[in-house]
Amino acid sequence: MTRRAIGAIPYLYPVPIVWVGALVDGVANFATVGDCAVMGIQPPLLAASLAATHHTTRGILDHGTFSVSLPTTADLELVDAYGQVSGRDIDKSSRVRHFTGELGTAPMAACCPVAIECRVVHCASIEHRRIFIGEVVETYVEEQFLDAETGRPRSLTELDPILYALDNHYYRVGSSIGVGYREGKPLARELTAGDEA
Amino acid sequence: MTRRAIGAIPYLYPVPIVWVGALVDGVANFATVGDCAVMGIQPPLLAASLAATHHTTRGILDHGTFSVSLPTTADLELVDAYGQVSGRDIDKSSRVRHFTGELGTAPMAACCPVAIECRVVHCASIEHRRIFIGEVVETYVEEQFLDAETGRPRSLTELDPILYALDNHYYRVGSSIGVGYREGKPLARELTAGDEA
């Protein structure tokens, strides 16, 4: 196998596409971003990276809060459009019905099956990027997607998220290929035993 | 539509599963994590979150470098196992052939189509989490996955990454559903024009 260096590219793939929401001058704004991630379960942390000049960034800095809403593939057109236009130029709240939660200043998109409100606990400035780390305050799920027994979303397929990769294509989620902490359990045991032997 | 609050859960889905690599006491170590993300293209930034007590964390703090390697679904068993066992207890380098790049202290997994080496430019400590933000130094791709014309990976399907969601299932990537900055371009124009009217 031959390997080639292709330059300093953050080629991590694919990433979930979300709307980062903030209240900017009293107006709910939604930026389409792929630079968003889970940074831990306990404490529950999300990270979102925006440009310092992004309209949304000002709202986050003003209130110390933001939201992450997860659109479905049904909203792909609007999601792609909201990655191309700024809340400085249009009122994005007019096309996205929204609601607020405990924080009041982190508007979430009502058309999304799942939306998460966060309080900023850390902000890193790296050149023109502002990387916000938020502690999750509350997570909201449309009732129709919840499993009655577990109280959690029933199926990732139903949530139907939008993925994106640096080949500049959007993707659906594919089929399940296994269960966490089960697929490698026998191997994990074997490896540990082997090392103790 | 009714919405239910399900608690403070970072329910962002799905996430790409990667190996965060570091050199710990001279041994290449690979931790399976889902808490890893793109934080910007220019400058090229990745974030990875680990527990302070993770074996890998020590290697990253010692050298100020880490790597992100992207396993394929073919390595699911090993990937799942490496999320369950610590490099403190086994020598993970024995099952993962690896190479180093410019930095020398960020070992990358040779079985992965893509691997990225990073220099830490910021570290946030939030409770027991250590969130490392790394500037990408170089990105390595297996030649067989590269498009001769573009010099970039040809197809996300070929790269065949592993996704994970908080329903504790692993997933494949599904089909392409559109092109970035194209699907919503007419709508973006319409929205901007409407606002100017």
Image (cartoon, coloured by chain):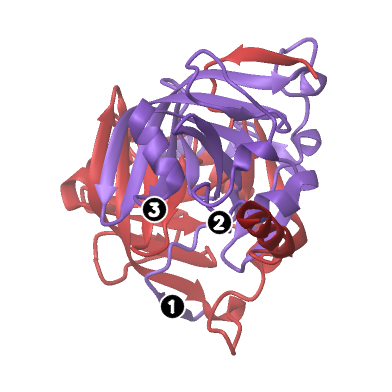
Chain colours: A purple, B red
Q: Viewer-nearest of labels 1 and 2?
A: 1
Q: Nearer the viewer, residue B134 or A49?
A: A49
Q: What residue type is labelled 3?
A: Leu
> Crowding near pointer 3: few (<14 within 10 Å), some, many (20+)?
many
Spatial CA span between label 1 and label 3: 16 Å
Q: Locate residue A64, reporting x and y percent.
A: 36, 27
Q: Which chain's residue wears label 2? A: B
Determine the residue positioned at 24% across, 66% down: B103
Q: Mark 2 points at which residue?
A: B71
Spatial CA span between label 1 and label 2: 18 Å
Residue B177: assigned label: none
Question: The C terminus of chain B lies in which quarter of the figure?
Answer: bottom right
Determine the residue positioned at 69% across, 48% down: A162
Secondary structure at badge 1 equals strand
| Left or right of residue B89: residue A31 | right
- For this orientation, the residue located farthest to the top is A149
Res B50 seen here? yes
Q: Name the residue under label 3.
A: B46
Q: What residue type is labelled 2?
A: Pro
Q: Locate residue B131, reporting x and y percent.
A: 32, 38
